[in-house]
């Protein structure tokens, strides 16, 4: 099997430093063929039509034509895989999250960029564009109202919202928002919900990619935690740590993941 063709990428942002930041991050990735830039919506439209990039990082807030104006003019059915870049607040992000493969909120760190880029690369490889274009159409149909677009798009979330759990031949749904934390068990994963444990056949890597990063974080190679349950982080010698959850559960935090947890808690520099 021949290797996949290098990706062509377009970075659209009216701020030079933001363009340079994304260019620098993309240079660290493998499989990138070309990275072009556009400093406004008009240039973005021309570049998308003439260059036909595989992936677009599209700033939402630009003078003149906004990111959504670009999508309207190109047409959702003709847009490449898109990652929105926005400084909007969390509620507004709900709308843009359903309209693209992912989004980045300024300022974002390297880990968040890598997560979004990995998800985009996977969608491109799977040719999963039909569903993405449907989500773009939802936002365009509801104008610039984040609330209406988010409400209309609840069924089109790019993230896993429920698990199918089978027990003795009976399959029952378990909502992701009900899961306290997830632990690895060989080729399986264990969902911990209010003191009960259910087993599903999923790897931790796959779950990390499928779950909403605003709600879940992988804190150890074998542990994913629901963030709104985190009560405290206890640091330990050697760089490891322990997360204390509401209700008293204590979960290991690996040395390599502790910095991300501290950033989420607002403790890291």
Image (tube, rainbow, N blue to C red):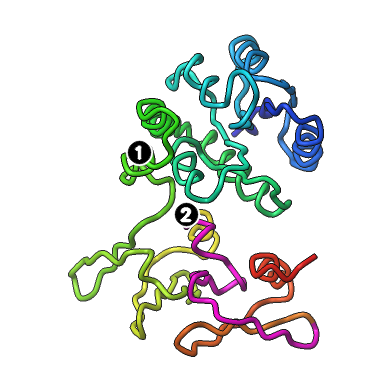
Q: Which disc, if any, is residue 210?
A: 2
Q: Which residues are magenta?
A: 211-238
Q: In which image quadrant can residue 116 be found?
A: top right
On the rendered structure, is 51 left or right of 212?
A: right
Residue 143 in the image: x percent, y percent? 41, 27
Comparing 147 with 174, the one in front is 147
On the rendered structure, is 85 left or right of 143?
A: right
Q: Residue at x 41, y 26 (%)?
A: 140
Q: CA distance from mark 1 to mark 2?
A: 24 Å
Look at the numbered discs 1 and 2 and tell me whether their residues touch, using CB distance below 8 Å.
no
Q: Which disc, if any, is residue 183?
A: none
Residue 160 in the image: x percent, y percent? 40, 55
Numbered-mark total: 2
On the rendered structure, is 65 left or right of 26?
A: left
Name the N-terminal-most of marks 1 and 2: 1
**Circle 1 residue:** 148
């Amino acid at each position: 099997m021949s290797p996949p063709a290098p990706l062509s990428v377009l970075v659209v942002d009216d701020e030079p430093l933001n363009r340079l930041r994304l260019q620098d991050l993309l240079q660290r990735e493998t499989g990138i063929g070309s990275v072009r830039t556009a400093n406004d919506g008009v240039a973005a439209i021309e570049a998308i039509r003439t260059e036909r990039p595989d992936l677009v990082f599209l700033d939402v807030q630009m003078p003149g034509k906004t990111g959504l104006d670009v999508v309207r003019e190109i047409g959702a059915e003709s847009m490449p895989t898109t990652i929105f870049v926005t400084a909007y607040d969390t509620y507004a992000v709900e709308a843009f999250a359903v309209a693209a493969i992912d989004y980045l909120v300024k300022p974002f760190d390297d880990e968040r960029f890598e997560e979004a880029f990995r998800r985009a690369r996977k969608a491109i490889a799977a040719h999963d564009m039909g569903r993405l274009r449907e989500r773009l159409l939802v936002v365009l149909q509801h104008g610039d109202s984040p609330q209406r677009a988010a409400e209309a798009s609840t069924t089109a979330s790019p993230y896993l919202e429920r698990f199918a759990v089978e027990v003795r031949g009976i399959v029952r749904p378990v909502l992701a928002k009900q899961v306290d934390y997830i632990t690895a068990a060989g080729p399986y994963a264990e969902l911990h919900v209010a003191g009960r444990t259910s087993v599903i056949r999923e790897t931790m890597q796959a779950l990390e990619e499928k779950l909403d990063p605003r709600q879940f974080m992988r804190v150890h190679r074998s542990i994913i935690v629901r963030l709104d349950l985190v009560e405290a982080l206890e640091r330990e010698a050697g760089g490891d740590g322990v997360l204390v959850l509401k209700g008293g559960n204590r979960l290991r935090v690996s040395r390599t993941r502790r910095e991300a947890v501290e950033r989420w808690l607002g403790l890291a520099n």
